[in-house]
Image: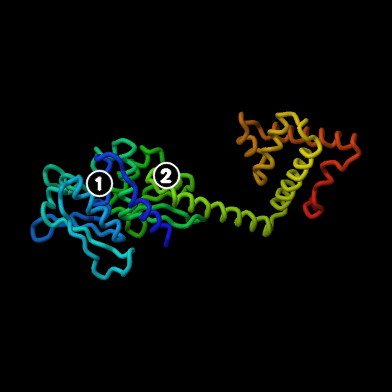
Amino acid sequence: MSLTAKVKHELTGVNPGSNQARAAQISSMLRFTGALQKIANRYVIEAEVQGEMLAARLAHELVAIYGVRPKVARATGSTSGEQGNYLVRVLEQGETLARQTGLMDARGRIVRGLPNKLTLGTADILSAIWRGAFLAAGTLTDPGRSAALDVACANRETAMALVGAAGRLGISVKQREVRGVNRVVIRDADAINQMLVAMGARKVLAEWEALRQRRETRATANRLVNFDDANLRRSAQAAVAACARVERAFEILGDSVPAHLREAGDLRLQHREASLDELGQRANPPMTKDAVAGRIRRLLALADREAQSQGIPDTAASVPESELLD
């Protein structure tokens, strides 16, 4: 099962909470499936969704919230199995439902975006909007250079409404037009994580994050193996050597390591490929790179003096020959 299918499967089982949030999710699903249609001079609702379970959930919510009784049928030409497409149709009271869900305004005009009362709603309503949009027209790609969570939108107004809803949740997204299709896209990994949490896809988030970590680790290993640039290779070797010396310093000094020097050494070991600048930013409180470098130098010097007094190998002796700089 693809990541997109897994997200939709998990989101189908999420309870939006209040009736207002449930109604917002229904409105969003109907909007992003392009459900409102005019047939034989009357308006009908016909939402095409992926999977029998999602179709049944939408039909149930329409009955519970709006009192309409939709019909569910497999879409023509749909693939077999649970992940085939299904149609949820409301043939009677379609215009009334369209007004109630915000697809149509009080004057009978089609609404191109999303109702303001939804996009300016509380966090649970905003999350329900995004959940409904993803269930209707969302995709999640595997983590990597092209990782993205995106939603296809019928028009620019709908896309901008979705961007605004994400902004009110504190999540940065972008609206783009790709091959004539308006899309709302999230590419930053942390923002994707935030949106999966907001929508309620915590199980898929754990899987997605684990896969991202594995790929980043593999990519880092490949970069170390394939360094063509001498300076980058030297930096990597220096980081490995520094970590080996810090580990040896901790062995030599044991519990006698001063707290501020131990903090700097721990930072070096916990973030082995980070620059001194990055180590300083991770400190609490933050330090300059010179302060970090100074503390690590003092830690090594203290350990080397102790090793000399005990007549044991110093920190430099712990550096593997293969990691010595050229």
Q: Residue at the location (46% across, 49% down)?
A: 205
Within the image, what quadrant is residue 161 found in?
Answer: top left
Within the image, what quadrant is residue 177 found in?
Answer: bottom left
- Foreground mark, 2 or 1, reads 2
> In the rendering, at what x and y percent does residue 85 appear?
28, 63
Which part of the image, by quadrant, shows the N terminus? bottom left
Q: Is residue 119 left or right of residue 263?
A: left
* Residue 163 in the image: above or below residue 58: above
Q: Which residue is mark 1?
A: 113
Q: Which residue is mark 2?
A: 197
Mark identifier at residue 322: none
What is the crowding at mark 2: few (fewer than 14 residues within 10 Å), some, or many (at least 20)?
A: some
* Residue 263 in the image: above or below residue 274: above
Q: Residue at the location (70% across, 29% down)?
A: 260
Q: Residue at the location (48% across, 50% down)?
A: 206
Tell me which amino acid carries mark 1: Gly
Could you say which is closer to the camera, residue 52 or residue 259?
52
Q: Residue at the location (11% across, 51% down)?
A: 93
Tag 2 secondary structure: helix
Q: Is residue 54 left or right of residue 266?
A: left
* Residue 34 in the image: above or below residue 267: below
Could you say which is closer to the camera, residue 73 or residue 118?
73
Tag 1 secondary structure: loop
> In the rendering, at what x and y percent does residue 323 appear?
77, 52
Could you say which is closer to the camera, residue 168 or residue 88?
88
Q: Is residue 279 left or right of residue 317?
A: left
> In the rendering, at what x and y percent does residue 241 appear?
76, 47
Tell me which amino acid carries mark 2: Val
> In the rendering, at what x and y percent does residue 10 appear?
38, 52
What is the crowding at mark 1: few (fewer than 14 residues within 10 Å), some, or many (at least 20)?
A: many
